[in-house]
Image (tube, rainbow, N blue to C red):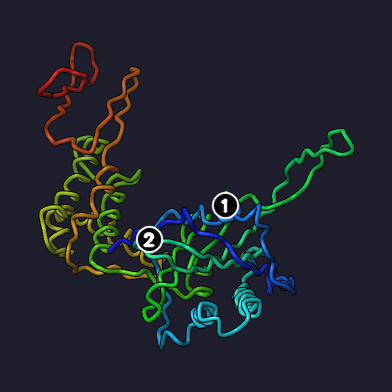
């Protein structure tokens, strides 16, 4: 089930700060000596800024190959929620754990912010949360201020909230199964360092989430710039038809079978089957989560993915044709005019243009 998560009333409380250097480069770790209290007049804006990256609701959960109790980050977070130890102590423990994992020369040093959050809404219930953000980039900015009746401009350096590099939001829900964890990595693909080595999380899956993930994966694969979809031209129309075929596969079944998907959507094309398996394997590796080849389909999760289907056909004569998600095979016909020595496109429709 996709959770309904909201942050409108969420408020930041106490904050622990740290500067996490790279151990491999002999850079130090600096941690807060005191809890950082956000001023009341700054609290609402600060809360909005640090929660802004977590609009994607793909969930993870803490995990460990032996026992969940042995996941050190999970244990530390659980103690914070249970208030078994002072927040400053546990916040610094998290910073030390991150520092211990920052031992590859390519991992950037950065500023760490660990904040307690109250009043996050999960399925209409108010819950506590813990936000962990790492910023690896400091940017220059200009500040204009009033000084003894005149204006002054100064240059300063700080963190751009829109460019925070890594983060996670741990919701105090379902502790027994490793909580619900929202996470991001500004570099694009979720890094192994952040997801696996520091957090130790894996995707939180059920039938609805698997439906969403595999259907989205299929549509992205079939419509991608390097899509292996073939045909007379192998262009936008062919890719759109193939992506719609994938959506229809999910809409018309109660159960997903990879074998049936390969037969009906990928048309048993050896190249397409092979490339899709590679595409899926890359997703699984980057997200530290294997995707099942056999699960129940929840069609209610497909509407947003269906909206991604389509594209624009561009021609060298200054004409573009946009294909929408409901485009059907056979509504476009290609041809070649011998007298003009040019290709043409024939479009079939039932009503006049609007």
In the image as oriented, which residue stretches furthest toward the top? 339
Closer to the camera in the image, 339 or 135: 135
Q: Which residue is mark 2?
A: 58
Answer few, some or many: residues within 10 Å of disc 2's Cα (few below 14, many 20 plus, some between 14 and 19).
some
Spatial CA distance of label 1 from label 2 is: 20 Å
Q: Position of residue 70 (x, y in %)?
A: 47, 87
Answer few, some or many: residues within 10 Å of disc 1's Cα (few below 14, many 20 plus, some between 14 and 19).
few
Compared with residue 103, is residue 331 higher up or lower down, i.e. above or below?
above
Q: Position of residue 117 (x, y in %)?
A: 53, 65
Q: In this view of the protein, can residue 103 be seen by the observer? A: no
Q: Position of residue 208 (x, y in %)?
A: 24, 62
- Describe the element under mark 2 as helix, strand or loop: loop
Q: In this view of the protein, can residue 211 be seen by the observer? A: yes
In the image as oriented, which residue stretches furthest toward the front? 40
- The residue shown at (41%, 55%) is 56
Closer to the camera in the image, 172 or 75: 172
Q: Which residue is mark 1?
A: 49
70 vs 28, left or right, is: left
Residue 288 position by quadrant: bottom left
- Looking at the figure, which quarter contains the C terminus? top left
């Amino acid at each position: 089930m996709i959770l309904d998560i909201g942050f409108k009333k969420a408020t930041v409380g106490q904050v622990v700060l740290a500067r996490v250097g790279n151990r491999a480069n002999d850079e130090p770790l600096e941690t807060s000596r005191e809890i950082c209290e956000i001023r009341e007049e700054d609290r609402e804006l600060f809360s909005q800024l640090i929660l802004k990256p977590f609009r994607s609701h793909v969930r993870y959960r803490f995990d460990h190959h032996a026992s969940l109790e042995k996941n050190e980050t999970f244990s530390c977070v659980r103690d914070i929620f249970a208030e078994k130890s002072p927040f400053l102590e546990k916040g610094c423990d998290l910073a030390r754990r991150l520092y211990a994992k920052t031992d590859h020369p390519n991992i950037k040093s950065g500023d760490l912010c660990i904040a307690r959050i109250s009043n996050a809404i999960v399925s209409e219930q108010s819950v506590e949360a813990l936000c962990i953000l790492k910023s690896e980039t400091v940017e220059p900015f200009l500040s204009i201020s009033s000084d003894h009746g005149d204006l002054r401009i100064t240059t300063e350096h700080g963190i751009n909230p829109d460019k925070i590099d890594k983060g996670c939001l741990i919701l105090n829900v379902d502790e027994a199964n490793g909580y619900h964890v929202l996470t991001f990595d500004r570099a694009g693909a979720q890094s192994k360092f952040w997801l696996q080595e520091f957090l130790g999380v894996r995707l939180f899956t059920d039938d609805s989430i698997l439906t969403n993930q595999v259907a989205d994966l299929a549509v992205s694969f079939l419509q991608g710039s390097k899509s292996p979809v073939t045909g007379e031209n192998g262009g936008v129309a062919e890719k759109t038809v193939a992506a719609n075929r994938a959506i229809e596969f999910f809409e018309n079944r109660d159960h997903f079978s990879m074998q049936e998907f390969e037969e009906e959507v990928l048309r048993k094309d050896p190249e397409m089957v092979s490339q899709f398996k590679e595409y899926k394997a890359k997703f699984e590796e980057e997200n530290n989560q294997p995707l099942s080849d056999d699960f129940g389909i929840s069609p209610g999760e497909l509407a947003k993915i269906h909206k991604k289907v389509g594209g624009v056909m561009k021609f060298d004569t200054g004409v573009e044709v946009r294909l929408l998600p409901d485009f059907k095979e056979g509504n476009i016909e290609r041809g070649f005019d011998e007298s003009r020595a040019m290709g043409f496109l024939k479009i079939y429709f039932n009503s006049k243009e609007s």
